[in-house]
Amino acid sequence: MRRHTFHMRSCESSQWTLRSQRMRIRVSSTAMPLSGYWVESALLEETVAPSRTFDFFGKKYNLKFMQISSRLQKILKEAKRVCVLTGAGISAESGVPTFRGGGGTAVWKGMPFDQISSAKMVRENLDEVWEWFDYRRSVLKDCKPNLAHKILAQWQDKFDDFTLITQNIDNLHREAGSREVLELHGNIHRSYCTKCNKRFFMSKDTIPHQPVACDECHSKVRPDVVLFGEFLPPSVYERAERKSMQAELFFIIGTSAVVYPAAGLAEIAKFNGAFLVEINPEETPMTKLCDESFRARSSEVLSLLNELL
């Protein structure tokens, strides 16, 4: 597996031992020294991509080299069936918070994340759940799609069969122009009736939004988000699974892909012969399974790959 990195990891603590060359990043004399950090790339089949700048602790740096293997270039240009799985990392550049406390940390009115965002709370205190999700929507109100979202929206017209799967509920893929998104965990801007399942779309600017009842059957309406203690929507996951099985090229972007059943999609793709590419600032348990892994921001890598299409 080929790994490409320009993340801020010190030389002393690095565990990367693959055959690679370490190319120092040149910075101006006024910038923070980066002598303890490097860009890693494979020695063979290298192609130098155009230079880019990236931000490090508020300073802009020029990344002169980033290696895209000739193998990945060839597959990217020839693949007809491409599948992308995204997670929270792709929206981090848009300022979307995770809302997850750690170790039972209270995140809302003294309640931990897995309590307020649970099926049990929907049954016992739906009004509280609505208040919590209205708060989350208010935080997302000013978040806009970033370059990575926009590039993936372009890809739907660049491949014969392109599938975008996301674990995110922030709706940013759709706002970026993606016409069809397989939302494994739902969408924070949708709701549905607990009895007849009628779906309702909520305007991003309509906050608070606590519907009294379904306009069809007058039953309670809840957020269309998969909560703790609930299953993924069967039809959505089954399609994601089928597309993963058929993929020639499969991207894992901004997610550790360790939570099942979503994690199984990459494994299914790999088992059926897909070329796996990971884009994540940090190494993940999925890294060893991937054919190529980029330690970088999603927008940076996708912009370089997009220029090859």
Image (cartoon, helix red, strand yellow):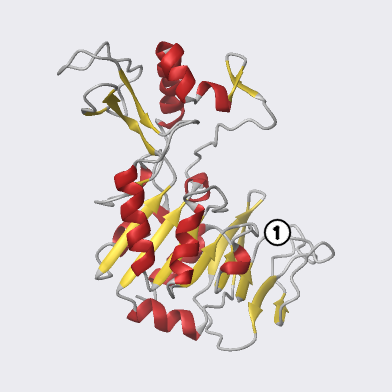
State the residue position of label 1: 8
Element assignment for label 1? loop
Q: Please name the residue shown 52% across and 84% down the image.
A: 47
Task: Pinpoint residue 120: horizontal percent, then vertical percent.
Answer: 48, 20
Q: Which of the two residues, 60 or 167, is positioned nearer the viewer here?
A: 167
Instruction: Indicate left or right for 71 with 161 as reference.
Output: right
Q: Please name the residue shown 53% across and 67% down the image.
A: 52
Q: Which of the two residues, 62 or 247, is positioned nearer the viewer here?
A: 247
Instruction: Indicate left or right for 122 with 11 as reference.
Output: left
Q: As shown in the figure, which amino acid type bears the numbered disc 1?
A: Met
Task: Pinpoint residue 274: horizontal percent, then vertical percent.
Answer: 43, 73
Callout count:
1
Asked whether residue 51 appears in the rendered view, the answer is yes
Task: Pinpoint residue 263: horizontal percent, then vertical percent.
Answer: 51, 54
Q: Which of the two residues, 198 or 297, is positioned nearer the viewer here?
A: 198
On the image, which quarter does residue 138 sit in? top left
Looking at the rendering, in which quadrant would you find the C terminus?
Answer: bottom left
